[in-house]
Structure formats: structure tokens, C-alpha cells
Image (cartoon, rainbow, N blue to C red):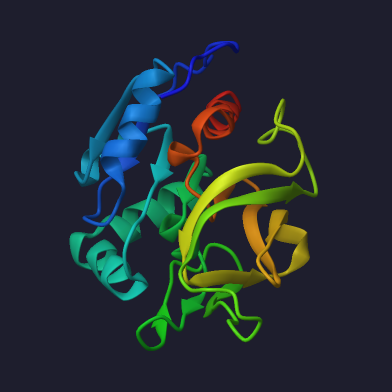
């Protein structure tokens, strides 16, 4: 982990990292510990209901993830808390893709329907290898508040073969991988990124801190 030379997280909110059996929980937890943030990792419905804000990480396939969310009952309660109660949430990688209307990964699967968009396989006709793994520059269309104090075109760590396609009004950042890939989205209280901030060293920590400082 990198040295912390920026201001501490201000939030005193009850933060829950949602555990639905697919998340990159250890790395996310390590980032939050480094930032000295109080949080809970939970799959318990009542704990999720009582939370003030959420992190929704994800590693793995869309089909397995959405099935886990539905069978556990988490999808129903989380959808209510996010779309009705307007509680803030940050999605990471697969956690972002789950917010779409549907995904074509492993067949056609309906998503959480929080943001109007679809998940499609990255076009590899430009000879770019799949999965898209490694560091890539991220270009911001808007810095405040999530990319505050992060230089435009900074590097973040990616690991994915599918991309989120949506209206440009939701897009906060893109990366160039032969084509422009959506790297970050925002709609009201919902913020999500395709890359892994918890693996992106100081820039990733700053991004997580910026989200938490909006709470």
C-alpha cells in the first residue's frame, strides 16, 4: 500500500461493503482500513437496510453475480435503499455492470436496472487482447467530486472483458482501449467505476476517499 499524504476521510456514516459471494472483498477492505474508515462487510438483509451508504465490489461473471443477489434477497432490499431511499453507493468493476439493464455475458441476463444501459463484450477486432488487464489512462469529463485532486489521464488498474454501454449523460470518465470504454458513471446518488480503485495505488485511494467524503 502507498503512503497517505492527503486529508483524512470525513464521513461518520454507516458504510457497508455488500457481500454477495462475488466481491473482491479483501482488497476493498484493505483500502478502507488504510483510509481509517469504519465499515462492515455484510450479506445480512437487516444490516444492509440500516446502512447509510454502500460499496458494491465484484469479480466474476454477471450471471452468477445477479443470481446470487436475487437468491439472497439482497437485490430487492438494495434496490429499494438505492433507488427509493437514495442512499449513496459506489460500484466497482462487476459491481458497476450489475447496475445496467442487462448483460450479454454468458447469455442474456437482466441486471438491477438502476442506470439505463447494457453490458456488451469489448470489440476485439482492433487486435486488443481480452480480457483488458492492466494499467490504463482514464480521461475525466468531470472532476468534481469523485476525481477531485486526481490528475486527468491518470492510470487506474483494469481487469474485464465486458463494457458498460450507456448514454453519455451518465459518463464521468473513459479509457482508450482501441475504442473508448466507459470507465466511470454517475446518476444521482449512484457512482461506479469499471477499474479497480482498490488495486490502483494512490489514485485509487484518493478516488475512494472522494466518494466517502461526499457522504
> Where's residue 65, x and y in %?
30, 66
> Where's residue 79, x and y in %?
42, 56
> Where's residue 203, x and y in %?
59, 32
Q: Quadrant of the C terminus?
A: top right
Q: Give the answer, above or below, for where 4 lies relative to 128.
A: above
Q: Quadrant of the N terminus?
A: top left
Judged left or right of residue 157, residue 185 is: right
Report if residue 37 is visible in the image.
no
Q: Give the answer, above or below, for where 150 lies relative to 114.
A: above
Judged left or right of residue 7, residue 180 is: right
> Where's residue 17, x and y in %?
33, 39
Judged left or right of residue 182, residue 78 is: left
Q: Which residue is drawn at 59% across and 74% down?
A: 128
Tally of numbered discs: 0
Residue 110 image-quadrant placement:
bottom left
Toward the viewer: 147 or 82? Answer: 147
Q: Which residue is drawn at 66% across and 81% down?
A: 126
Toward the viewer: 11 or 87? Answer: 11
Judged left or right of residue 76, residue 159 is: right
Q: Residue at x 50, y 44 (%)?
A: 90
Toward the viewer: 87 or 198? Answer: 198
Residue extending farthest right:
141
Report if residue 59 is visible in the image.
yes
Q: Residue at x 77, y 60 (%)?
A: 169
Amino acid at each position: 500500500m502507498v503512503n497517505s499524504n492527503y486529508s483524512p476521510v470525513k464521513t461518520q456514516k454507516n458504510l457497508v461493503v455488500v457481500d454477495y459471494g462475488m466481491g473482491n472483498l479483501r482488497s476493498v477492505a484493505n483500502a478502507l482500513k488504510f483510509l481509517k474508515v469504519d465499515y462492515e462487510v455484510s450479506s445480512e438483509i437487516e444490516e444492509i437496510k440500516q446502512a447509510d451508504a454502500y460499496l458494491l465490489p465484484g469479480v466474476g461473471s454477471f450471471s452468477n453475480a445477479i443470481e446470487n443477489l436475487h437468491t439472497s434477497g439482497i437485490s430487492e432490499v438494495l434496490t429499494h435503499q438505492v433507488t427509493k431511499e437514495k442512499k449513496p453507493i459506489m460500484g466497482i468493476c462487476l459491481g458497476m455492470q450489475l447496475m445496467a439493464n442487462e448483460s450479454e455475458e454468458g447469455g442474456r441476463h437482466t441486471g438491477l436496472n438502476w442506470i439505463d444501459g447494457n453490458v456488451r463484450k469489448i470489440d476485439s477486432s482492433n487486435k486488443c487482447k481480452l480480457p483488458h488487464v492492466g494499467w490504463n489512462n482514464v480521461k475525466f469529463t468531470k472532476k468534481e467530486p469523485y476525481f477531485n485532486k486526481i490528475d486527468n489521464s491518470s492510470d487506474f488498474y483494469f481487469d474485464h472483458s465486458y463494457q458498460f454501454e450507456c448514454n453519455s449523460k451518465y459518463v464521468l470518465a473513459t479509457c482508450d482501449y482501441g475504442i473508448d470504454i466507459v470507465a466511470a458513471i454517475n446518476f444521482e446518488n449512484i457512482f461506479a467505476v469499471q477499474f479497480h480503485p482498490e488495486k490502483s495505488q494512490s489514485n485509487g485511494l484518493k478516488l475512494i476517499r472522494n466518494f466517502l467524503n461526499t457522504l
